[in-house]
């Protein structure tokens, strides 16, 4: 979701992580969003409304019964205005209220009236987070379409360590930007298998061969497919980003593991999108112990399975490949489309750093078997992914 020009309702509840939400308000503004902050009374004990008023450049609401704009029913006005609502931090208390539909403060009342996507960012003590009551309440929210961003693990203000830390403001902003714009149902009832990220080919217990794939493009495709109502199986090499909520993650490390996992899942998929940057070669031998330094080192490499070609041999699903090229992009992409028996190939230029590997941006050309092509100019990977998914939907009819 592009935040630029959007109205974001930021709900702040009473936890020590409320101070981080000040940075979140500021980051949302910098991303171009208009921010309306609603705080609970407890939140206002941790950070003053004035802080948020200054950062959001808008009045902050804490009280159900203040009559600053007597002509508006304020909670309804705020709910109707919002393109997106984010509750960060979300305490166990507020999560429980939302799960039960209790509307006894301004924030809970406003959220109950929201029809836009609502993102809940929990923050609390680990035992409170893991308590079955909280877990059931979070599940209720997810079942009702709320988007829950799982908390991070680490040191907590209560002196313990574990799950329950509020996600960092920048992580939340990245997560919001990766959210698909609108929910569609173009892939309702469809199962989509997506590969993403790099693979690691072990040389010895501490060294490996890999590439610069971050997984961002594949994960954005997973989010885009989920946004169209698909069931998503995400086979991912090692990356440092979180999978979109709702995707079933199958983590793998090596090309061989990815091959085995894809072979196991492929027959249950209606659509397969292979975005992973799979290593083409792997060391023939993996040393059992860390290799000692030598003046020169020769590694014998053997070819890995070409997973996409293997899937293309007995093709049942609509099959989409990627082509990462540095020259003759159209020619090489069309060659792969033909040779690997694909229905569609998405070609990207990976010679620079502005797009392609590891960037938040990409620019691609989508080639179909019938010879048609769609060029998608440089944009955020989240938006490129949504466009690719729409092209797939057009193709499968
Ligand atoms: O992860 P990011 O940092 O966001 O970067 C995105 C990306 C650049 C990795 C992505 O957009 C991309 O181009 N993915 C394909 C990378 C690649 O390996 O391209 P290729 O042209 O070498 O391979 C062609 C196709 O065969 C790909 O669909 C690939 O997944 C598949 N393949 C390749 C080798 C192999 N052994 N098995 C395969 O299945």
Image (cartoon, rainbow, N blue to C red):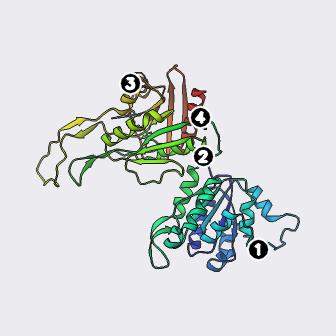
Q: Nearer the viewer, mark 4 or mark 3?
A: 3
State the residue position of label 2: 180
Asked if residue 397 can be seen in this view, the reply is: yes
x then y, percent, for residue 49: 68, 74
Q: Position of residue 94 (x, y in %)?
A: 65, 69
Residue 388 percent across, percent down from the top left: 55, 35
Q: Which residue is mark 4?
A: 390
In the image, taking residue 379 as reference, residue 55 lies left or right, namely right
For marks 4 and 1 on the same chain, the one whose residue lies earlier in the sequence: 1
Q: Earlier in the sequence, mark 3 or mark 1?
A: 1
The answer to which of marks 4 and 3 sits earlier in the sequence is 3
Residue at 57% from the left image edge and 27% from the top image edge: 395
Q: 10 Å neighbourhood of mark 1: few (<14), some, or many (≥20)?
A: some
Tell me the number on the disc at residue 63.
1
Structural distance between the alpha carbons of marks 4 and 1: 43 Å
Front one among 324 and 353:
324
Q: CA distance from mark 2 to mark 4?
A: 12 Å
Local packing at callout 2 (Cα closer than 10 Å; few below 14, some 14-19, many 20+) is: many
The answer to whether marks 2 and 4 mark residues whose Cβ atoms lie closer than 8 Å is no
Q: Is residue 233 above or below residue 119?
A: above
What's the distance in space between the residues labelled 4 and 3, CA to CA?
A: 25 Å
How far is the residue under mark 3 from the one under mark 1? 64 Å
Tell me the distance, in whole angstroms, between the alpha carbons under discs 2 and 3.
33 Å
At horizontal 57% and vertical 44% (from top left) the residue drawn is 226
Q: Are marks 4 and 1 in contact (CB under 8 Å)?
A: no
Residue 313: which numbered mark, if any? 3
The C terminus, quarter of image:
top right
Q: Residues within 10 Å of mark 4 (few under 14, many from 20)?
A: some
Find out whether the residues at labels 4 and 3 contact each other: C-beta distance under 8 Å.
no
């Amino acid at each position: 979701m592009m935040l630029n020009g959007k109205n974001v309702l930021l709900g702040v509840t009473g936890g020590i992580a409320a101070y981080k939400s000040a940075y979140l308000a500021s980051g949302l503004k910098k991303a171009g969003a208009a921010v309306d902050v609603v705080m609970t009374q407890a939140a206002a004990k941790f950070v003053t409304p004035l802080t948020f008023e200054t950062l959001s450049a808008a009045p902050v609401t804490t009280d159900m019964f203040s009559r600053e704009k007597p002509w508006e029913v304020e909670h309804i006005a705020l709910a109707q205005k919002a393109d997106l609502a984010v509750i960060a931090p979300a305490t166990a208390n507020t999560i429980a209220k939302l799960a039960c539909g209790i509307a006894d403060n301004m924030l809970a009342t406003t959220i109950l009236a929201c029809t836009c996507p609502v993102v809940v960012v929990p923050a609390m003590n680990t035992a409170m987070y893991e308590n079955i009551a909280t877990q059931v309440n979070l599940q209720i929210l997810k079942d009702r379409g709320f988007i829950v961003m799982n908390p991070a693990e680490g040191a907590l203000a209560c002196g313990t360590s574990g799950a329950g830390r509020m996600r960092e403001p920048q992580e939340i902003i990245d997560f919001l930007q990766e959210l698909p714009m609108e929910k569609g149902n173009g892939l309702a009832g469809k199962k989509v298998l997506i590969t993403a990220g790099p693979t690691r080919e072990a040389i010895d217990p501490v060294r490996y061969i890999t590439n610069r794939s971050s997984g961002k493009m594949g994960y954005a495709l997973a989010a885009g497919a989920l946004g169209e109502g698909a069931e998503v199986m995400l086979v991912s090499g090692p990356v440092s980003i979180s999978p979109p909520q709702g995707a079933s993650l199958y983590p793998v490390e090596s090309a061989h593991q990815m091959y085995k996992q894809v072979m196991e899942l492929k027959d249950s998929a209606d659509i397969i999108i292979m975005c992973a940057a799979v290593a083409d070669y792997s060391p023939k031998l993996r040393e059992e112990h860390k290799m000692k330094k030598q003046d020169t080192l020769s590694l014998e490499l053997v070819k890995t399975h070409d997973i996409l070609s293997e899937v293309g041999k007995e093709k049942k699903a609509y099959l989409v490949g990627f082509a990462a090229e540095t020259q003759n992009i159209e020619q090489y992409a069309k060659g792969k489309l033909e040779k690997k028996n694909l229905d569609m190939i998405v070609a990207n230029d990976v010679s620079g750093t502005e797009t392609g590997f590891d960037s938040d941006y990409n620019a691609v050309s989508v080639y179909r078997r019938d010879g048609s092509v769609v060029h998608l100019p440089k944009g955020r990977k989240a938006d490129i992914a949504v466009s690719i998914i729409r092209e797939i939907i057009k193709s499968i009819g």
